[in-house]
Image (cartoon, rainbow, N blue to C red):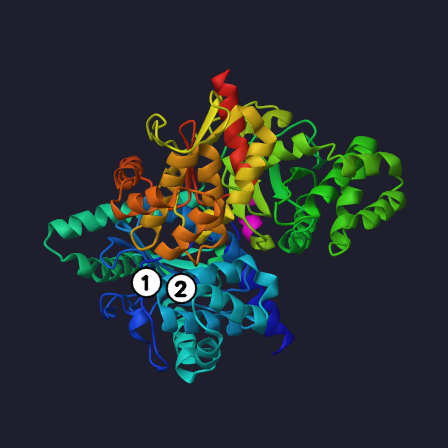
């Protein structure tokens, strides 16, 4: 590969994507040793939408209903950081719309410069062909969750966890037909106009990169209305996708003179929306208060994409000088373990030496991004001429934790949780975009600001004037799940101010992964929180309903202690929850086995499980895990900060 090719490919990955794993599916079945795409991949029989402008078929891994009115086709790369970050958005969409309204189709699109990506894609395709979509999404989630650990040994281990034995996996991943499917996806992507990852087609309408969720929902809602109209015309449900994709292609050609899908994704998506992004007096700043353009940057010191945008920021300063100011909001991401300590050092540098001290620390931390351990930080503090003892105190005790948390909450409010993320006079720029992308917006904003100056607005008040009527973030989504049922298992304080309804499924791997987060919630909020279990076994998890009934019997027999002990055993042994396994766990916990067996035989607790399912359906909860925190909705296995933010909001409102 030439250096030029590598650079172009690299740009396509990280520029096309920024914006900002709980995939589950209906697939089932089992295959033998055949090399063709097997019956496992064809739940309900083979089908094809090959006549669509973006063709899909039962040869593709799928989440959702075959007849869903909206189809989201995602071209993605298992080694692309932006593809990983958009996974959370995709899961939120699944939760919001459910399988009857939305289906998600996976297309392999490993970029050339990601030399380790193809083996992971071959592995994913092997799992799909061996065991179908459900197994695929399990492997898919593990591949993204462990992006830096995609070794041959781990790929085989993830396949095994998804239900594919090592011998079958090793045979299939090297099969020419598996590799041909990956290459066919790449060829299709290139044909329809994919130039970087992630890339999406929503009923054929192109969406480039890891955009905020509102970008997706706006188009999905539009396509739901179009699908309804199509159905009213008499189009059969399984023909709606073909009809709409082809219609949308014609509309795109008519509006733009060319297929929208072939537009350069590096140009990004700019709807000129102005967001009312507040700035604080203690935001580190470059440039004067009288600047015509204010760039608010959400960034963090361990993010590689944040460091790659630094030359662009310097070029902006060199080009526009005092016409632009940059304000930095540290947003340490939870999976970057050294980002928080580094952010505390930078804030302490600001406290000791103001803006000059912060930016000196900023530059040093980015220059040494791979060396951010405590001893490294102490050395940087000394080189920067800081009081090292105070730096150690700030880092060790998370001195600026509340300030950093406020930045994280603000980023979350404005769908700017991924880094880097920019607002140019309130206009969103997602990711490490090139200079020209910023220049276009900056030039437009300078013209607007000069117009305000002519009207008498003072230079120092330009930013506030420009964002005064800007868009504010919507309030958190709410769900009404009613009062706590008297027969629902719970833990925490009986009269807690905050009640968290947990709708969960004992066979769902993502429900198990959120348990450490819930433990952290209980440890940090204590008697302020009560967690209520609501049974929500998904229809394609065939063992989950009986497991729920068994857990409910443990509650009846031994209350909180019995239920949560049984709960823990089920999640610790998710692959072993057949009837015999349930009886074994009950016996180990000292339950009355005669009563336990009779409860399962007679389905004594089926009505309770069905009642929780009905409450979930009525509230519009389509997947697991899902949480309702004093009415506020959390979709999926979100990280602790998401829970903390809503719990604090609920506590404040409860006073």
Q: Residue at horizontal 41%, vertical 64%?
A: 136
> Is 33 placed left or right of 333 in the picture?
left
Question: Between disc 2 and disc 1, whose residue precedes?
Answer: 1
Magenta range: 437-443
Q: Which residue in the protein does label 1 denote?
A: 27
Q: Does the CB distance between marks 2 and 1 fall below 8 Å?
A: yes
Q: Residue at horizontal 75%, vertical 45%?
A: 362
* Residue 381, image quadrant: top right
Q: Residue furthest left?
A: 234
Residue 130 - label: none
Q: Residues within 10 Å of mark 2 (few under 14, many from 20)?
A: many
* Residue 6, image quadrant: bottom right
Q: Position of residue 507 (x, y in %)?
A: 40, 52
Q: Position of residue 637 (x, y in %)?
A: 48, 45
Determine if residue 405 is in view: yes
Dominant SS of magenta comes to helix
**Residue 441 lies in the magenta-colored region:** yes
> Is 384 placed left or right of 146 in the picture?
right
Q: Is residue 385 above or below residue 436?
A: above
Q: Nearer the viewer, residue 420 or 148?
A: 148
Instruction: Give the position of the N terminus as an image quadrant.
Output: bottom right
Q: Which residue in the protein does label 2 denote?
A: 135
Q: Secondary structure at mark 2?
A: helix
**Residue 116 lies in the magenta-colored region:** no
Q: Residue at horizontal 50%, vertical 31%?
A: 646
Q: Residue at horizontal 43%, vertical 35%?
A: 558
């Amino acid at each position: 590969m030439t250096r030029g090719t590598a650079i172009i490919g690299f740009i396509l990955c990280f520029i096309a994507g920024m914006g900002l794993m709980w995939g589950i599916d209906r697939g089932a079945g089992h295959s033998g040793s055949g090399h063709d795409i097997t019956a496992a991949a064809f739940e309900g029989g083979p089908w094809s939408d090959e006549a669509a402008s973006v063709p899909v078929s039962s040869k593709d891994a799928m989440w959702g209903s075959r007849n869903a009115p909206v189809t989201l086709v995602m071209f993605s790369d298992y080694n692309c950081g932006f593809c990983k970050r958009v996974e959370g958005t995709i899961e939120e969409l699944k939760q919001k719309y459910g399988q009857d309204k939305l289906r998600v189709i996976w297309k392999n699109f490993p970029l050339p410069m990601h030399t380790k990506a193809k083996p992971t894609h071959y592995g994913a395709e092997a799992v799909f062909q061996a065991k179908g979509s459900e197994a695929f999404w399990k492997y898919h989630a593990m591949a993204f969750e462990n992006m830096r650990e995609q070794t041959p040994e781990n790929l085989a281990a993830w396949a095994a966890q998804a239900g594919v034995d090592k011998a079958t996996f090793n045979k299939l991943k090297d099969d020419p037909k598996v590799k041909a499917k990956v290459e066919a996806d790449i060829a299709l992507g290139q044909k329809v106009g994919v130039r970087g990852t992630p890339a999406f087609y929503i009923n054929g309408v192109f969406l480039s990169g890891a955009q905020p969720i509102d970008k997706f929902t706006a188009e999905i809602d539009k396509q739901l209305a179009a699908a309804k109209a199509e159905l009213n015309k008499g189009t059969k449900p399984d023909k709606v996708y073909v009809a709409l994709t082809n219609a949308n292609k014609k509309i795109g050609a008519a509006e733009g003179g060319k297929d929208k899908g072939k537009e350069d994704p590096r140009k990004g998506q700019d709807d000129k929306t102005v967001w009312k992004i507040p700035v604080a007096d203690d935001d580190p700043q470059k440039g004067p208060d009288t600047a015509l353009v204010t760039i608010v940057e959400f960034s963090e010191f361990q993010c590689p994409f944040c460091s790659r945008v630094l030359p662009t920021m310097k070029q902006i300063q060199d080009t526009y000088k005092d016409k632009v100011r940059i304000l930095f909001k540290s947003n340490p991401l939870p999976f970057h373990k050294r980002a928080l300590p580094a952010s505390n050092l930078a804030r302490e540098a600001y406290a000791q030496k103001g803006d000059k001290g912060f930016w000196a620390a900023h530059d040093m931390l980015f220059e040494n991004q791979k060396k951010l351990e405590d001893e490294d930080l102490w050395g940087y503090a000394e080189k920067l001429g800081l009081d090292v003892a105070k730096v150690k105190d700030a880092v060790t005790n998370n001195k600026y934790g509340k300030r950093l948390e406020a930045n994280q909450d603000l980023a979350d409010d404005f769908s700017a949780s991924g880094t880097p993320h920019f607002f140019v006079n309130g206009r969103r720029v997602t990711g490490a975009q090139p200079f020209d992308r910023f220049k276009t917006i900056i030039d437009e904003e300078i013209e607007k600001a000069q117009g305000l100056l002519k009207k008498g607005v003072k230079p120092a008040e330009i930013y506030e004037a420009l964002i005064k009527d800007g868009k504010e973030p919507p309030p958190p989504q709410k769900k009404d799940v009613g009062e706590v049922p008297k027969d629902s298992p719970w833990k925490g304080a009986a009269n807690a101010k905050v009640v968290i309804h947990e709708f969960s499924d004992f066979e769902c791997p993502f429900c198990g992964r959120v348990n450490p987060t819930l433990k952290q919630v209980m440890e940090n909020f204590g008697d302020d929180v009560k967690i209520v279990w609501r049974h929500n076994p998904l229809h394609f998890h065939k063992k989950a309903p009986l497991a729920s009934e068994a857990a409910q019997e443990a509650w009846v027999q031994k209350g909180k202690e019995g239920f949560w002990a049984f709960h823990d055993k089920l999640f610790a042994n998710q692959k072993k929850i057949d009837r015999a396994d349930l009886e074994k766990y009950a016996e180990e916990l000292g339950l009355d086995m005669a009563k336990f067996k009779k409860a399962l035989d007679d389905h004594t607790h089926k009505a309770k499980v069905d009642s929780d399912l009905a409450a979930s359906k009525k509230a519009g909860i389509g997947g697991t895990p899902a949480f309702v925190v004093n009415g506020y909705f959390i979709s999926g296995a979100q990280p602790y900060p998401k829970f903390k933010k809503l719990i604090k909001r609920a506590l404040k409102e409860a006073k």
